[in-house]
Image (cartoon, grey):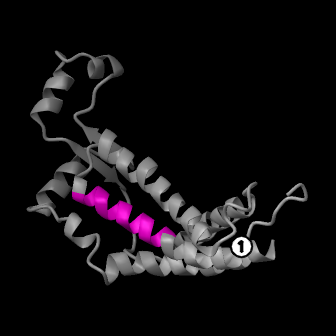
Amino acid sequence: MTRILIASVVGAVVYFVWQMLTWMVIPLHGPTVSGLPNESAIRDAIIQQELESGVYIVPFGSDEEMMDPESQFSQRHVAGPLLSIFYHQDGMEPMMTSTLVRGAAIDFLSVGLASLLLSLVSDAKRLSTYVARVGFVTSLGVFLGLTGHVAYYNWMHFPADYTAMFVVDAVVGWFLVGLIVAAVVVPQPSPAE
């Protein structure tokens, strides 16, 4: 358990720093996100809607409309534009301490889970080498990229370049975590082995 805790702390620091680098130093995400021209007018139009905080998509349709290629929803979807709006009614500081602390806690829990999964591998012989253990942890980044980011690309039509950079971010980040976790957590053969 001590090794899992050590791997969780050190791995979380590595992943946290990696995430900060990809947004603030390495131009990984910056080119995939843009500001709106005439942002104030669009912002004001959205505020006038008096929306509650939440996620909004345009066009929006019922289940029946989504399945009917002749519906108004389907026609609007084909014609475009498609919008996904993540709306927070109240503002907040851009880099609040609480956001950073929550991010660090999420990273700690994620690396802790990866470390625990590695320690529970039933066939320790397969992961007896450092490289195999790094590969195991890196595969979690690939899993995240596919089930999270590529799924949003497919279902929510996120742009390909935006998706690709998040997948690269996840895979490289979990590779870096794997370098730490694989050095600290070594699955032990069961007594039957």
- Quadrant holding the N terminus: bottom right
Q: Is any part of residue 53 visible from this angle?
A: yes
Q: Residue at x 60, y 79 (%)?
A: 180
Q: Magenta stretch containing residue 166, yes or no?
A: yes
In the rendering, at what x and y percent does residue 187 appear?
A: 75, 66
Q: Provide the secondary structure element on which disc 1 rests.
A: loop
Q: Residue at x 29, y 49 (%)?
A: 85
> Mark 1 — residue?
185
Q: Quadrant of residue 184?
A: bottom right
Tell me which amino acid carries mark 1.
Answer: Val
- Quadrant holding the C terminus: bottom right
The image shows residue 51, relative to residue 103, as above or below, that is above
Q: Main secondary structure of the magenta part?
A: helix
Q: Start and end of the magenta stretch?
A: 161-174
In the rendering, at what x and y percent does residue 158 appear?
A: 27, 49
Q: Closest to the observer: 37 or 31? A: 31
Q: Closest to the observer: 136 or 39? A: 136
Q: Residue at x 26, y 44 (%)?
A: 157
Q: Residue at x 36, y 65 (%)?
A: 168
In the rendering, at what x and y percent does residue 111 appear?
A: 61, 68
